[in-house]
Amino acid sequence: MKKTAYSVGVDEAGRGPLAGPVAVGVVVVPKNFDWKCVPGVTDSKKLSEKNREAIFLRTQQLKKEQVLDYAVSLVSAATIDKKGITQAVRQGIDRGLRRLKLNPAETEIKLDGLLRAPSNYPHQETIVKGDQKERIIGLASILAKVIRDRHMVRLAKKYPEYGFEIHKGYRTEAHRTALAVHGLSVVHRASF
């Protein structure tokens, strides 16, 4: 078996909200990557918004310096309604891997939870609570969360009656109240 040259982490953000896309983060680093370059990486849910943003900005800088690469795919509420959340996440994984133009034979992929990469990637491992156990998965979760949250803030300007900038589309009391008054928008998941 050929030795893999790259490590890839995959995680998603926004599986459970009532509105907005699901975001799938895919991060690729060389096998000898020095994690001191990006301190504080862990599960995105354990970090403050300020810390997630700082890690995101640092990762953008490292991408510009060609130290690492990443892609985040947003898969729409309409696609989630049509194909289901599992297929939507799979579509996001596939899209992210294709954007990064990785050679499957040289790539080791670590995925969070129950996620799977396409079968043409022979070196893959799914890790329960992987975003807490593997920094590469944690970084993917952070990138997905930051990009999805920023997207929801932009949607809030278009649909101000729902308060997306506050709850990011999740099932809060304020969101449910807004839905009772205004009904579903085109960015809501009708199947949820």
Image: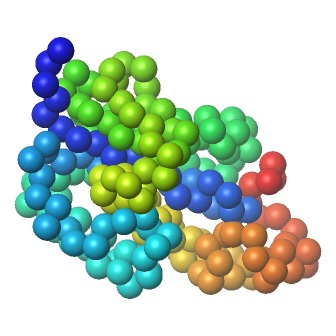
Indicate whether 169 appears above or below 99: below
Is residue 168 or residue 135 the one in the foreground? 135
Q: Quadrant of residue 99?
A: top left
Q: Is residue 99 visible?
A: no
Question: In the rendered image, which quarter contains the N terminus?
Answer: top left
Q: Is residue 57 left or right of residue 5?
A: right
* Residue at horizontal 28 percent and vertical 73 percent from the top: 40
Is residue 35 or residue 169 the one in the foreground? 35
* Residue at horizontal 50 percent and vertical 46 percent from the top: 128
* Residue at horizontal 61 percent and vertical 35 percent from the top: 87
Indicate whether 109 appears above or below 171: above
Q: Is residue 124 visible?
A: yes
The scheme the figure's colours follow is rainbow
On the image, the x and y values in percent for residue 138 come to 37, 59
Question: In the rendered image, which quarter contains the C terminus?
Answer: bottom right
* Residue at horizontal 43 percent and vertical 26 percent from the top: 118
On the image, the x and y values in percent for residue 84 come to 70, 39
On the image, the x and y values in percent for residue 184 come to 82, 64
On the image, the x and y values in percent for residue 9 come to 33, 46
Q: Is residue 62 left or right of residue 131?
A: left
- Check the image and name the residue furthest to the top: 1
Q: Is residue 13 left or right of residue 56?
A: right
Q: How many marks?
A: 0
Q: Is residue 100 left or right of residue 50?
A: left
Is residue 124 or residue 20 the one in the foreground? 124
